[in-house]
Image (cartoon, grey):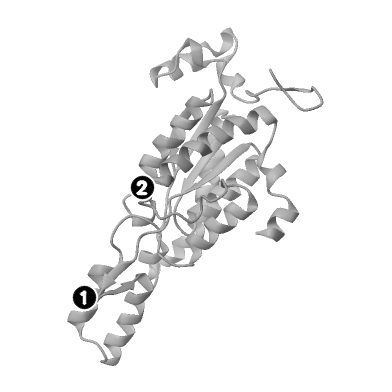
Amino acid sequence: MAQTPDGTPIDIKPRSRDVTDGIQKAAARAMLRAVGLGDDDWVKPQIGIASSWNEVTPCNMSLRRLAESAKKGVQSAGGVALEFGTITVSDGISMGHEGMRASLVSREVITDSVETVVHGERFDGFVGLAGCDKSIPGMLMAAARLNLASVFVYNGSTMPGVYKGNNIDITTVFEAVGACAAGTITEGELTDIERAACPGEGACGGMFTANTMSSIAEALGMSLPGSASAPAIDRSRESDAERAGEAVVNMLRLGLTARDIMTKKAFENA
């Protein structure tokens, strides 16, 4: 059994024993066998992999593969990884119409849903993966509420688009809408900018909410050092996610939880 520096024993399965230990838990184990677990897994900590992957927005599209990397990290560190999903509302798509009323609400739904699954399934810790404006704080709020071993993984931002030899991003499109309305560019030019601005997966390419929140998560200590800045297509994203999976198991061995990291000084620093 793991121990603190002063020799106090640390239980690395503080919650999952509720579903793995004893003859009374045979039915729970039977269900877990159906998802791929076996006899050797009952002594391992169970880690939830909470992902906001979806096809609604490019911000979260690479989270499917990052979740696989996070699971690999958990497993290599001696844990069991079980993935589940949560929702996302895209601010970039929802702005300017009735749909934006759902944006802030979605943050609370994300937090509630992650907390509900982690609590109900008795996970010992979790890795939260997100990539857009409300899903990032939603994951961090869930970590704070649950106060378990937890690490956040950011999807990364998109690469810049290119128009007439210049880098552009989603802000360029908003500005072009105004320019078109003012008559300084044509609708055809606006369409060309629209087609070029978002070349692929990743959060909006600027210091908007997603990239600001990912930087805050790293400064808080809830993400691994250096993991906030790489773009979504960078190979380091997979290694960051794998290391996050390893880190959450190591947190269990050290007896560390989210509120040990998210202190008042950490918030002031962030």
Callouts 2 and 1 close, C-beta under 8 Å: no
- Is residue 90 at least partly visible in the picture? yes
> Left or right of 269: which side holds 57?
left
| Apparent side of residue 247 relative to residue 180 in the rendered image (left or right) | right
Q: Residues within 10 Å of mark 1 (few under 14, many from 20)?
A: few
Inspect the image, locate mark 2, and give the three-letter code of the amino acid beneath it. Answer: Ser
Q: Total of numbered circles in the picture?
A: 2
- Return the mark for residue 131: none
Q: Depth check: 8 or 113 in front?
A: 8
Q: To which residue does mark 1 refer?
A: 191
Residue 205, placed above or below residue 189 = above
The residue shown at (60%, 20%) is: 18
Q: Residue at x 55, y 36 (%)?
A: 126
Locate the C terminus by quadrant: bottom right
What residue sits right under mark 2 in the picture? Answer: 62
Q: Is residue 50 left or right of residue 179?
A: right
